[in-house]
Amino acid sequence: MTSERDAVDEIVGQWHEVRPDLETTPMEIYGRIYRLARSMGDRIETTYARLGISRGEFDVLATLRRSGEPYRLSPRQLSATLMLTTGGMTGRLDKLERRGMIRRSPDPHDRRGLRVTLTDEGLALVDEAVVAGLGVQKSALEQALDGAQAEQLAGLLRTLLATTAPGE
């Protein structure tokens, strides 16, 4: 465990100077969660960029991959899962289709609907990207925590998320 001060400690220290009555533990926790998420997000984005995709494009490919064979969902299902507007989803799908990562086809059960299917190229890319992204995350964790600490942190964050953002 590090005893070095970080930017959050500096912010909290400033608050203690001007408002010693404040309980700043929540600020310390959420400030660090925010900074960690932003930093790891940037690292993951860089990793995916080396593979030629954005994080948003990875999210589409990964959602299709996680759905299981035949790796097919409707644009509406993708939008709901990724919390995107239909316009935002259309832009991502257009890019991925042009690159041959997905294929759009008519929904046989709904004349107005479409199905989005992961192509073999998209499957290979998302499998490579998920391994690369997990490698970055694992490396960062191993530099700071042992296995038991990582499991404990995962459990604590699960509890926190369940009570502060149910359904996320």
Image (cartoon, helix red, strand yellow):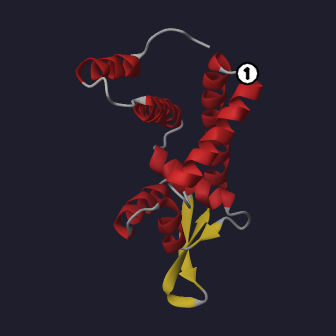
Q: Would you place residue 102 above or below residue 160 in this image?
A: below
Q: Residue at x 45, y 62 (%)?
A: 83
- Taking the image as shown, residue 50 lies to the left or right of residue 126, namely left
Query: How many badges with numbers are in the image?
Result: 1
- Taking the image as shown, residue 130 lies to the left or right of residue 77, namely right
Q: Residue furthest left?
A: 18
Q: Residue at x 68, y 41 (%)?
A: 155
Q: Amino acid at mark 1?
A: Asp
Q: Quadrant of residue 127?
A: top right
Q: Residue furthest top?
A: 4
Relative image position of residue 165 (x, y in whole percent): 50, 55
Relative image position of residue 21 (x, y in whole percent): 32, 28
Quadrant location, the N terminus: top right
Relative image position of residue 112 (x, y in whole percent): 47, 88
Relative image position of residue 144 (x, y in whole percent): 63, 18
Q: Judge whether residue 20 can be spotted in this image.
A: yes
Q: Which residue is mark 1?
A: 146
Q: Quadrant of residue 69?
A: bottom right
Q: Residue at x 30, y 23 (%)?
A: 20
Residue in the foreground of this view, choosing between 79 and 101: 79
Q: Would you place residue 87 above or below residue 60 in this image?
A: below
Q: Residue furthest right?
A: 148
Q: Would you place residue 122 above or below residue 24 in this image?
A: below
Quadrant location, the C terminus: bottom right
Q: Judge whether residue 119 can be spotted in this image.
A: no
Q: Residues within 10 Å of mark 1 (few under 14, many from 20)?
A: few
Give the SS element for disc 1.
Answer: loop
- Taking the image as shown, residue 140 lies to the left or right of residue 5, namely right
